Image (cartoon, coloured by chain):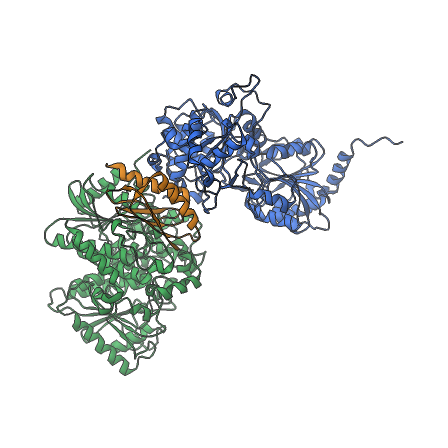
Amino acid sequence: MTERNWHSHRDAKNARLSSALSLLDGKFAKTKDVVKVLETLIKPGDKVVLEGDNQKQASFLSAALTKVDPEKVHDLHMIMSSISRPEHLDIFDLGVASKMDFSFAGPQSTRVSQMIADGTMKVGDIHTYLELFGRLFIDLIPNVVLVAADKVDREGNLYTGFNTEETPTIVEAAAFHDGIVIVQANEVVDKLPRIDIPSGWVDVVIPADKPYQLEPLFTRDPQAITELQILMGMMAIRGIYEKHHVQTLNHGVGFNTSAIELLLPTYGEQLGLKGKICRNWELNPTPTLIPAIESGWVDSIHSFGGEVGMEKYIAARPDIFFVGKDGTMRSNRALGQVAGQYACDMFVGSTLQIDQWGNSSTVTHGRLSGFGGAPNMGSNPTGRRHSTPAWQSLKPDDDPLAKGQKLVVQMVQTFGSNKKPVFVDHLDAEEVRKEAKLANVPIMIYSEDTTHIVTEEGIAYLYKTDSMEERKAAIEAIAGVTPVGLRSDPKEVKKLREKGIVALPEDLGVRRQNAKRSLLAAQTMDDIVEWSHGLYNPPAKFRSWS
Amino acid sequence: MKNSFVELKGRQRAFALVDEGTGRELVGPEYDMISPHLEPQKIVPESDDGIILLKGKLDGKNVVVISIEGKFQGGGIGEVSGAKIVAALEKTLEDNKKGIKEYPIIILDTGGVRLQEANYGLLSISEIQNVVIALKKYVPVIGLVPGRVGSFGGMSITSAILSYLITTKKARIALNGPEVIEQEAGVREFDSSDKDLIWDTLGTRQRVATGIADEVVNDDIKAIKEAISKAIDEKKDAHRTEKADFYLSLLDHIDFDKPLNTEEYRKLYAENKTEEHQVPEAVSSDKPGTKSRGRLWFEKLTGIENAKSEYPTVLHAEKDGKEYIAIVPDENNKFPRVRHGEVGLQEGFVVSKIVNQIIEEDKDKEVKRPIVLVVDVPSQAYGYKEELIGIHISLASAAAAYAKARQAGHPVIDFIPGDAVSGGFLAHGLQSNRIIALADKSITIQAMSKASAARITQRTIAELEEATKHVPAMAYDIFNYEKLGALYKLVHDVSSWDANDDAVNEIQKLIDEAIESTKGKPTDLHFRYETPIAVESGRKATNEMRKMVFEQWNK
Amino acid sequence: MEKLHFTYQNTKTIEKFVHVGVVASGDLEVLLYPADETTVDIVTGSDGFKEVWKNVLNRFFDRYSLKGKFIIHDFGATPGVVNLRLTQAMEALNDEE
């Protein structure tokens, strides 16, 4: 009996790298050779992580992957946290890839739906970010990872800076299990500002033809914030933030939470809440939080990713952000997701549909979007043992062994801007599951985890309900004239208000006529620049002044 | 954080400018004077048609505030909204003539002509410009461009005519928006997705540095009120439409085949030295000029063969005591964007030189020389450099000169054998007191090309054509134009390209009749409201609005 | 564009004309005149939402039984915005009472 080869992966990796030797000068390959390098180092059927984060895309490598010879490279099993660029899907049309495990497909969600329906793409699972990152170390261990760096030095050390995001996590999964790490770099320099990933983890570096794609995804122009969003923001501050003394939190992406951020220095100040709420954040560095930071509301912010234009501001506020000695922030999506799920008392997000029981999803007919981090942040981590007032305030008082609960808040208007009702009897996701043959209905946040729903009509305190019937009635009470809301019975609403399960604006002392844009600490991007003392530099597409 | 003016809606803006408690709105929303032209095109109207009209006091001074609601249909000017502005300005003029000091303030937040009422918009804007010019003899007419929409199109021409223009840094001023230039001249001429380029070129910092606006104030209600009040007290007047020689000198030193950026232009502008320019009459030559209906008729009416001019696109000559002026194409012109007969930078300034000289020459004469405009203008020029320099000032200079001539007693007569489109028509044609046009299918008379109008109003060309069937003002032909009531005469037996002797005689006779018809009549533009077609249908809504404003003027 | 007409049997007399809103994208204006009968005339840029309008109005009038003539010019407002503007019109009525 021959002894088992315990280093077959290492042998395979070394063989592949040897066959690429003619293309390499040390770790460095030439820009023009990128397709050859990929054809040599990637084998059919490989599990390949292609870095597509929220903001940062390994666009040079993804473009090259569409040019490889499908005879040489085919049936790849792609693992991607975000499907963002057209070529992420082109490789399926070309036959280079055949299977996909992913988290989020926002910009490409329509095409993803079609490709699954016509069989061009097989889907492993649609994950939360943490689930996907976790599986890179368990049963989706990659053969090759394709990632992006800002700068690389002559030895192959990487600087990923503000937009570090998930690069170290992906690289770690390959580097310590004999996968191949291929990096596109914006720039080759003699000295890095700092080392984010050591050269020992890196196999191949290819200077990119142009800098990686980077989108200001989390920038919300205050000019677009509406009176209804302000009204809902006021209700949330009074009825949730203040009521539960929420100090540690995460905000999702959207105008509802931007409105809240801009109401803190004005409305929040009037209520005397500074120092009492919203002190420690897990948050992408959204420009709309600048007025609150400058007014002294915020103690700390850790970020999943960077945000274009915030670089100088963040560098000048190291007390607040996580900034290296070199003066640039380091983001980290994996740790950010952990912090968001476990360390924060509250998540506030939004959705496209909520069903009669309180389940919510952004998956609608023809759009298989995935959910990114929302299912992590928007779920109750039952292993948590926090003593914070917010966590404890949701503890039922009739059970001696009871524990607290995370606040998971959904903020929606009863109808979307397309005039489609947000409150529906059944989520489109139920149908999508059948069409896409998924194992699970793609629900983003489950009813059992959802503690509050805020609409322009009022707040439903779902955690206080003691039966599904009562939960449904609470949802109906704030669902306006949607089919769900029309079932609401005024007498029932009165009872729910008395029990504190439903609160209307008047119950919270919020006056509709005060919900004016003049209440926002900044009404334009220009105002935010002013708040930042000129340190925030908004991307050109947001410019509306001279 | 601060008391933003820009943030306010049109009505709040109007009330914000007057001393607390002094504002009285005229023909407010309760009268529900909607535009009759929108619903037939399936467009939702607004009860004030986007114009808020207020009488009140500013620091104790009587003011008339006209505020354009930029959020309704992009602040576009249509028939009803235009009539409201014109009626208010006319009453202000009347009061000032009587010795009652009243100061008009116009808040411009407008894309210009409301493309859904195209030809009404052009008429209305020319009528607004006419009253502004008359008013400036009595009081400064203050313009405020706060921003969000800014001031574009025909209303940017109006902005150049106002006495003094106050802005915030959130505003842009231009004749053609970047999208229109991109549509008409291509993305290499002006990339409408390049926000930095747009704001650096059309934003008010550049505009104030280069004479297109006068002052940038903070977006703060108090600061804006102070600036307006001060401008009134100091009787500020930028004389923006009286700088033809300055601009013609500037144009002498710019190579239009080379790129020009904002920095370079600022420098050129600052260092420019004004030289006197002369515009001699056109003379005969051996070589025919670029063919056009305008050139054909100019040559026939003046008897000048192969007319040639120092400024090849502008022909003028006196014949039988009448001054003829035409803008014509020149396929080799040094300004690439005017080679098809468009009205560009040079054309407007040259025309204003010609007309102002006529006014000057006749200033002591009892009978003023008639001015006949041969109109064949396919559009204004669409170009980046045109916008950088401020083509709207050129067009405004021409329009202002024609209006001044008419107000001084010169009969100003249009003869339209060709196209009459958009800013070109505003500059060269719409300040006339009589319009004669040929009933010829080749004539296009409109505010914007179909392709651009479709892009800006987010409709397909097919949808646009459908709309023209329901609303005559949307149409592109002279037959529908007649339905608006603005024409003195539509000539049915003469065609545009056939200027035979009989036809020329007939047109000459009609021109003389038209001149005769102005004798002893007011020198304003009221003729357009009073033709049988105008009274019956063409300007019915205009006349109703005028009546209401007049009734409510003094409560 | 669609025109809708509704009538209601409301009880609370109003004393003056009020106006709120603008016909901006996603917004609407409400004109409310004193009248002996309650009528609502709507011009809306979004077709096919008659039921939703009826539901919004029913809800609003259940709460505030304002007797008067309503004219609404709607440029694609959501029911939430419609309700907000109606409520603001109601508040404007009470402002100077």
Q: Height in image: A154 above or below B215?
A: above
Q: Position of residue B220 (x, y in %)?
A: 28, 38
Toward the viewer: A153 or B207? B207
Q: Colour of chain C?
A: orange
Q: Is residue B54 left or right of residue B250?
A: left
Toward which corner of the image does residue A76 lie, by quadrant?
A: top right
Q: Height in image: A255 above or below B551?
A: above
Toward the viewer: A155 or A71? A71
Q: Which chain is blue?
A: A
Q: Residue at x 56, y 16 (%)?
A: A400
Q: Position of residue A200 (x, y in %)?
A: 67, 31
Quadrant of the snapshot with the N terminus of chain B: top left
Q: Position of residue A311 (x, y in %)?
A: 48, 34
Toward which corner of the image does residue B348 lie, by quadrant?
A: bottom left
Number of callouts: 0
Q: Is residue B242 visible?
A: no
Residue at the extreme top of the image, as rendered: A400
Q: Colour of chain B?
A: green
Q: Is residue B286 visible?
A: yes
Residue at the extreme right of the image, as rendered: A1
